[in-house]
Amino acid sequence: MTMLLQLVGFAGTAVLQIPSYVLLVLASFGFVPDWGAYVVALAWSVLVLEAAVRIGGRVWDRYAVAALTSIRSWPGH
């Protein structure tokens, strides 16, 4: 199950970066200036990262107590 969730996370990241990939391909063929593609791809990546951190933080805040309680019940913790 863990591997499947990791695969979904990896695939989701790849799908979210499709706009960057398209711009970089267009830049490699000369349809878009290289510097413009790099700037937009970097800005898009930062926006995706910020959204992921915010969503992850909300999920962690919601389930943190249950997760920490579960970890404390393990032997040696």
Image (spheres, rainbow, N blue to C red):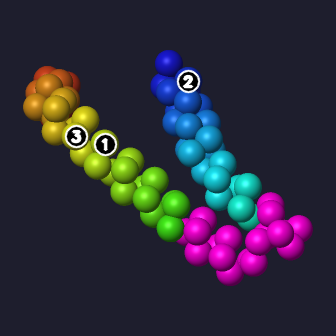
Q: How many marks?
A: 3
The residue wearing badge 1 is 56
- Select label 2 or label 3 by which is in front: 3
Q: Say whether disc 2 or disc 3 marks the residue closer to the N-terminus.
A: 2
Q: Determine the CA span between mark 2 and mark 3.
A: 22 Å
Neighbor class of circle 3 (other Cα within 10 Å; few <14, some 14-19, many 20+) is few
Farthest residue to the bottom: give it.
35
Q: Few, some or many C-alpha atoms within 10 Å of disc 2 (few <14, some 14-19, many ≥20)?
A: few
Q: Kindly identify which numbered label has been placed on residue 6.
A: none
Identified at 45% across, 63% down, the residue is 46
How many neighbours does mark 1 have within 10 angstroms: few (below 14), some (14-19), or many (20 or more)?
few
Q: Which mark identifies residue 4?
A: 2
Q: Which residues are magenta?
A: 25-42
> How far, Cα to Cα, is label 1 from label 3?
5 Å
Q: CA distance from mark 1 to mark 2?
A: 18 Å
Placement of 73 over or under 29, stated as above or below:
above
Estimate the x, y position of residue 25 in percent, counting from the top left. Answer: 80, 61
Q: Amino acid at mark 3?
A: Arg
In the rendered image, which residue does mark 3 sit on? 58
Q: Main structural element of the magenta stretch: helix, strand or loop?
A: helix
Q: Quadrant of residue 3?
A: top right
Question: Residue 11 location, x and y as percent?
Answer: 61, 36
Q: 20 or 67, which lies in front?
A: 20
- Tag nearer the camera, 1 or 2: 1
Q: Nearer the viewer, residue 12 or 33?
A: 33
Secondary structure of residue under mark 2: helix
